[in-house]
Amino acid sequence: MTANEVRSGAITEVLNRTGVETAEIRPLSETWATDVFNLDKMEEALSKNAFKAVKKTVQTGEPLDPATADIVAAAMKDWAMGKGAKFFSHVFYPLTNITAEKHDGFIITNADGNAITEFTGSLLIKGEPDGSSFPNGSLRMTNAARGYTAWDPTSPAYIMQTANGATLMIPSVFMSWTGESLDKKIPLLRSNAAMDQAARRVLTLMGETDIAPLNASCGAEQEYFLVDQHFAAARPDLILAGRTLFGAPPAKGQEFDDHYFGAIPERVQIFMQDFEDKLYRLGIPAKTHHNEVAPGQFEIAPYHEAANIAADHQQLLMTVMKKTAAEHGFLCLLHEKPFAGLNGSGKHVNWSVGNATQGNLLDPGTSPEQNLNFLLFCGAVIRGVHKFGPLLRAVIASASNDHRLGANEAPPAILSVYLGDQLEAVFEDIKNGCVSVSSDGGEMDLGLSQILNFKRDPGDRNRTSPFAFTGNRFEFRAVGSSQSVSGPLVAMNTMLADSLNWIADRLEVQLEGGKTHAEAVAVVLKELLEQHGNAIFGGDGYSSDWHEAAVSERGLRNLPTSADALPVFTEPEVVELFESTGVLSAVELNARYEVYAEQYINSIAVEAKLVMELAKTVIYPATLKYASELARTITAAQELDASFDTGQVKVIADNANKLMETVSQLAVEAEKHDFADTEAHMHHCAKAIRPLMEKARVYADTLEAEVDDAVWPLPKYREMLFIK
Ligand code: ADP
Ligand code: MG
């Protein structure tokens, strides 16, 4: 088959679809968490004492004694085997955005050669994958390849059903032989602990006596595209890079705003129901789904959960989504910008912190004492965004998210915080010292008249802010759709811990000096806002005025590319932040920088190779064939009428030559490897390679609009986006 036959064949295949069988959808009561070994299942399976011990571990993270671990392991194995599992696997989250797993059988043989099964506490607690092939940023030499996985009892084990059987999956951390974190879960757990400690300090100073363990919560909205697999199979760029490297804009895009919240195509609806049914079995609380702005783009958002569990569930959701989409004949694209000229995909990370005794500390609530806590926690976030905005930019840096950030539909690469009119006014008053404090009762009055009436949705939504207060939580909107939520959660928890400690230090001084709680809060927040209020911005984050003013007037940093942002991981303030809170050592942090930089460089290298390959072996040959045929046809036509014009041949020749010239330049730049350091190499990718790829695309896309549709080899945007 020639390439263009593949394309026309794909259209025929898609049009001839007989439809997917509707999966049998069962009631929630029959499916919810059936494949999860959660506390309910443990209570059924374990003795009272064993259950008590494991429950304590789950709720507080306290280690489990070896005897109980054996009992839990045996119960877990029985439960899993009852569901058909013969294998188990520690699931872990290496420094890429992927989920990793190594499967082991329960089976062993005894002296008589009979197969028996075994799963001890120590097998449950510790695994040892050959770690050498996971990125480690020089944390381990390959000859010292040991990496350990260790069970995280706070995230429940579950069964993964695949066509070839069921496997018991055990959420785990992943570390080097020397105990350094090689994964995304360890820092998340540590950052939660740091936040818990700092929050506890502040709450204690504020007079709270009963303080339950504090947890960050996360609810992540996931955007994605679906493309029929037949089209995807004929697009090497979609398969290997997850995005289209070429493709002329279709005559109709998203200009009519007719996709957003429109009726979901039936085939997609069937996929979503099947997918969500699978999520429910895994205990993932899928809550909303809808069309997104671009044609072919959708969103799913589960209900929020404790950050550690939400992060594991988010990884699992991405895995199940891709798999289920394939079963329904779709390629699911999690790339941040699969189609040029259309909206990209993000993953809005909704985040708050709270506990069972004080509730959600980012909820303004209605009573003054709670409002004081709220103001302190909210102030702490403002300070964090101001002081560590560049870090927030760094944790969402990737070659793919760079295409989206700062584009005119996505949050800018400058980090500021949106509070809404009402809350912004309150903080403005505090900063200006016009919140009067009554000396006796210890309650603020003025500003409080606004605050006391706080409603849950103060002010409008600001879609142009990268970091927005949305009534009882912050929404980090700049996170990319393919990214793990762990990096952003770690950064937010850690900056919050740092700010809460800063606040606690000052509160201590004020309270010792005899101030009431309300007076002390007013003084501390005034100082905080004088130093950090510059991060508060309620205007249009997309506007060029803001990009200018943010930097020149507010002193905020604009880090447009990952090459600019990733080195932030090695800056002294950031190292100090992570070391002082015990979340990451300087060595662990540097390893992250190295791994993320390498991924950035590698992704761009792969794309550059694909651009050259597609240009030379697909687009140019098709163009040449068409041009010679066109020239022959015109000559024949001119015999009939001399006025037939050869202009189109010239346009095609011109663009084809320029395409090949650009590809040659790209080859030269892509071959360069002698850079002073990683940062220089990244800048080469951002400033030399990327622009040439884009330049090549302009010529190729012009050709797509000139060459006969019948011979164009690659499926077109209008087909991939509109034919389902
Ligand atoms: P919208 O599109 O209006 O921003 P969605 O309903 O799509 O909202 O998603 C909001 C997400 O925020 C959901 O995952 C929801 O569970 C989550 N969320 C709500 N309250 C909190 C909270 N206190 N902490 C963290 N996430 C929250
Ligand atoms: Mg949303």
Image (tube, rainbow, N blue to C red):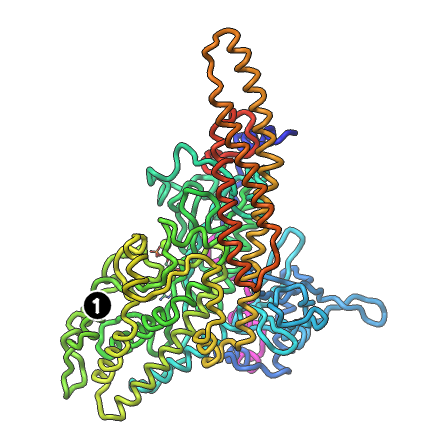
Residue 595 drawn at (x, y percent): 57, 64
**Is ligand 1 less than 8 Å from the beta carbon at label 1?**
no
- Looking at the rendered image, the quarter that the N terminus falls into is top right
In-image side of 623 versus 196 (left or right)? right
The residue closer to the viewer here, 33 or 247, is 247
The residue closer to the viewer here, 469 or 599, is 599
Check disc 1 and report its element: helix, strand or loop. Answer: loop
Q: Residue furthest right?
A: 112
Label 1 is placed on what type of residue? Phe
In-image side of 387 versus 398 (left or right)? left
- Residue 74 in sight in this render: no
Residue at the spot 52% in from the left edge and 79% down from the top edge: 57
Residue 27 is covered by the magenta coloring: yes
The quarter of the image that holds ligand 2 is bottom left
Mark 1 surroundings: few (<14), some (14-19) or many (≥20) residues within 10 A = some
Residue 572 drawn at (x, y percent): 46, 75
Residue at the spot 22% in from the left edge and 89% down from the top edge: 515
Residue 188 drawn at (x, y percent): 49, 71
Q: Quadrant of residue 10?
A: top right
Determine whether 231 is above or below 24 in the image: above
In-image side of 224 versus 50 (left or right)? left
Determine whether 446 is above or below 466 in the image: below
- Residue 199 in sight in this render: yes
The residue closer to the viewer here, 616 or 677, is 677
Q: Which residue is tagged 1?
A: 454
Q: Residue furthest top?
A: 640
Determine whether 237 is above or below 440 in the image: above
In-image side of 470 versus 572 (left or right)? left
Residue at the spot 51% in from the left edge and 73% down from the top edge: 187
Q: Magenta segment range?
A: 26-52
Q: Quadrant of residue 393?
A: bottom left
Residue 377 is covered by the magenta coloring: no
